[in-house]
């Protein structure tokens, strides 16, 4: 009769037993499965975590500044200052930040995180970012649809850094900034996953939103309130069990990617040089 495996393990010396458990744990980690598929709510846009439980940006935010208000005068000053960056490395980076499609946009935070963010190398992390994009973006539309604020490129009869998007943006309210909400939500989520990279991640989240100033797509007050919507969205995400489970898996993926030594393919030195160019008056 073969021996009972439980008894065999129990009779092992403690050091050997711990080694066996460590080996088994490593085997299990190496066989981690990809996340379950999530349906798209429209082509390229995955279903978020929150569904109808999104924060109400209309209830959360004040009315956007307008007319002769000091806040709107500041919006105009920052807008005009940001447009002096056309042709600079910061403008090139802002143009790249304007593209919210995957896999391109996942790389926007790779330098700040210190590891590549790919569907193959970190599938849970990749999917978390896609689903958070949906929640943080949709959460802005209560206020967007109500106020339908005119964007700066329309106000000044100019163009954005992505002229092909201008026709669509003309029909989409400027306040608050959806790009900013998404970028700041990602920064908060990634900081939780990799707290040792907190400063770089939060700075990148801030700059991701400010890229919309450089692109002539948003006013300064749009950016500020986009961060507020993102903060509310991430707070609500933590009440969602599926989100918390995916975050735990993503945290382990980041550790695994670090251990493998996977390299970031983006030019982090060029990104740092571009981000060193500050936008006058930006808050």
Image (tube, rainbow, N blue to C red):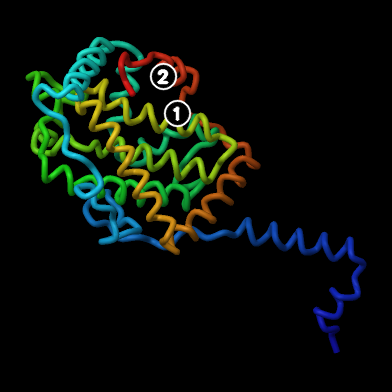
The residue to which callout 1 is attached is 203
Q: Are marks 1 and 2 in contact (CB under 8 Å)?
A: yes
State which quadrant residue 187 falls in: top left
- Rendered residue at 22%/38% (across/down): 176
Q: Position of residue 263 (x, y in %)?
A: 56, 32
Residue 275: x %, y % from top left: 41, 19
Q: Report the Cα–Cα distance between label 1 and label 2.
A: 9 Å
Residue with the mark numbered 2: 275
Viewer-side label of 1, 2:
1
Q: Earlier in the sequence, mark 1 or mark 2?
A: 1
Residue 217 spot, x, y in % from top left: 19, 27
- Name the outermost residue toward the bottom: 1
Q: Is residue 219 above or below residue 134?
A: above
Relative to 135, does residue 62 appear above or below in the rendering? above
224 w.r.t. 132: above or below: above
Q: Quadrant of residue 158?
A: top left
Vertical position of residue 238 compared to residue 3: above or below: above
Left or right, 96 with respect to 114, comes to left
Q: Is residue 283 left or right of residue 61?
A: right
- The x and y percentages for residue 230 are 34, 43
Residue count near mark 2 (Cα–Cα under 10 Å), binned few <14, some 14–19, many ≥20: many
């Amino acid at each position: 009769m073969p021996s009972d495996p439980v008894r065999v393990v129990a009779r092992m010396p403690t050091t050997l037993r711990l080694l066996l458990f460590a080996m088994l744990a490593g085997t299990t980690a190496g066989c981690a499965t990809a996340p379950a598929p999530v349906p798209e709510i429209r082509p390229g846009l995955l279903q978020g975590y929150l569904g109808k439980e999104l924060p109400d940006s209309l209830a959360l935010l004040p009315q956007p500044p307008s007319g002769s208000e000091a806040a709107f005068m500041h919006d105009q000053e920052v807008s005009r200052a940001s447009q002096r960056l056309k042709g600079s490395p910061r403008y090139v980076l802002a143009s790249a930040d304007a593209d919210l499609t995957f896999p391109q946009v996942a790389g926007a935070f790779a330098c700040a995180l210190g590891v590549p963010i790919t569907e193959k190398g970190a599938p849970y992390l990749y999917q978390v970012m896609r689903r958070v994009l949906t929640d943080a973006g949709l959460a802005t539309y209560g206020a967007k649809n109500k106020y339908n604020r005119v964007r700066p490129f329309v106000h000044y009869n100019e163009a954005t850094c992505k002229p092909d998007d201008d026709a669509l943006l003309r029909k989409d309210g400027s306040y608050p900034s959806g790009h900013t909400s998404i970028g700041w939500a990602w920064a908060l989520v990634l900081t939780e996953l990799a707290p040792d990279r907190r400063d770089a991640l939060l700075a990148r989240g801030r700059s991701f939103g400010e890229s919309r100033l450089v692109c002539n797509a948003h006013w300064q007050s749009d950016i500020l309130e986009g961060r507020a919507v993102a903060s509310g969205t991430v707070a609500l995400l933590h009440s969602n069990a599926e989100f918390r489970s995916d975050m735990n898996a993503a945290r382990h993926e980041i550790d695994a990617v670090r251990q493998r030594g996977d390299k970031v393919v983006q030019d982090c030195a060029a990104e740092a040089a571009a981000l060193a160019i500050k936008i006058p008056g930006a808050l």
